[in-house]
Amino acid sequence: MSIKTLTDLQGLKEGNIAELEQIGITSVSELREALNDQTKVKEVIKGLSGVGPKTVEGWKAALSEAEPKAKAEPKVEIEDEVEVVENAGGYQVKIKPEISDETADALAKRAIISGNRPAFKRQEWFRYSKLGDKWRKPKGIHSKMKRQLKRRPPMVDIGYGGPAAVRGLHPSGFQEVLVHNTDALDAIDSKVQAVRIGRTVGFKKRVEIEKKAAELGIRVLNRMV
């Protein structure tokens, strides 16, 4: 129900209209604004005869439903602000390699195969903690795991391997190159190769390598940040 005049409000009598005028309310819009102010609400309840808090709450709900909704302004994309965020140290898209569609498909297949591949663990890793669970090929003529008897863990086999076309590639598709100084970056092809800084490189030299790699557009796989 649309509220066009004060008389459309349920529970409002003709005598209450004159009482509202004494308070300073003469239209529906003014009453709507008054009901949003707690001080005005108290004045309305005190000034109107036969009107209680429940009636005023009903008026407020009816007027809020009848309030005309403002038209939504169309969203405007501001490209300048996006550029400012990126330059201010926001998220930057990582460098992607230039690979063929066949290589991309092979990488996707390898990811699926890797997810289904079992965890190969050392023989009797669960019995002796000193052995650890790092894979070691079982040896010995009495090894039941080597003979692949029933209920024995799986062994590393060629059938668990991924596509040969992407063997050795980083999951991003880059060829990994280990570097220990800035001079090694000059021989890197940034389109297909990415660098991994050696673990023995110190902090100062690591910063220099990352800075030069950013200038040459080379991706560093183990950046500090």
Image (spheres, rainbow, N blue to C red):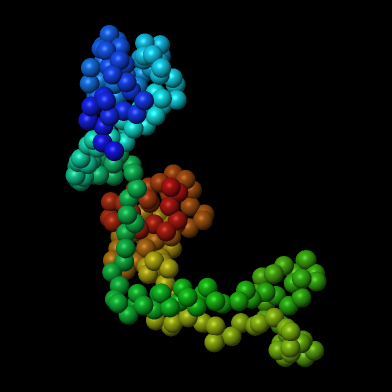
Residue 81 visible from this viewpoint:
yes
Q: Residue 31 placed where, x, y %?
A: 29, 21
Q: How many marks?
A: 0
Q: Position of residue 56 (x, y in %)?
A: 39, 23
Along the horizontal axis of the image, is 212 left or right of 76? right
Q: Position of residue 98 (x, y in %)?
A: 28, 69
Q: Nearer the viewer, residue 71 or 77?
A: 71
Q: Nearer the viewer, residue 82 or 129?
A: 82
- Rendered residue at 74%/88% (across/down): 150
Query: Which image quarter is the N terminus in?
Result: top left
In this picture, residue 128 sits left or right of residue 221:
right
Q: Residue at x 19, y 44 (%)?
A: 74
Give how far across and how far down residue 187 sits, in percent.
31, 64
Q: Is the residue 193 above or below the residue 160 in the image? A: above
**Residue in the image at 32% along x and 59% along y:** 95
Where is 161 relative to 82, above or below?
Answer: below
Asked whether 58 or 33 is in front, the reply is 58
Quarter residue 11 falls in: top left
Q: Quadrant of residue 37?
A: top left
Res 140 visible: no
Residue 5 drawn above or below residue 138: above
Which residue occupies the extreme top position in the image? 22
**Residue located 76% across and 87% down the image:** 144
Residue 202 is left or right of residue 44, and the answer is right
Whether residue 148 is situated above or below residue 189 in the rendered picture:
below
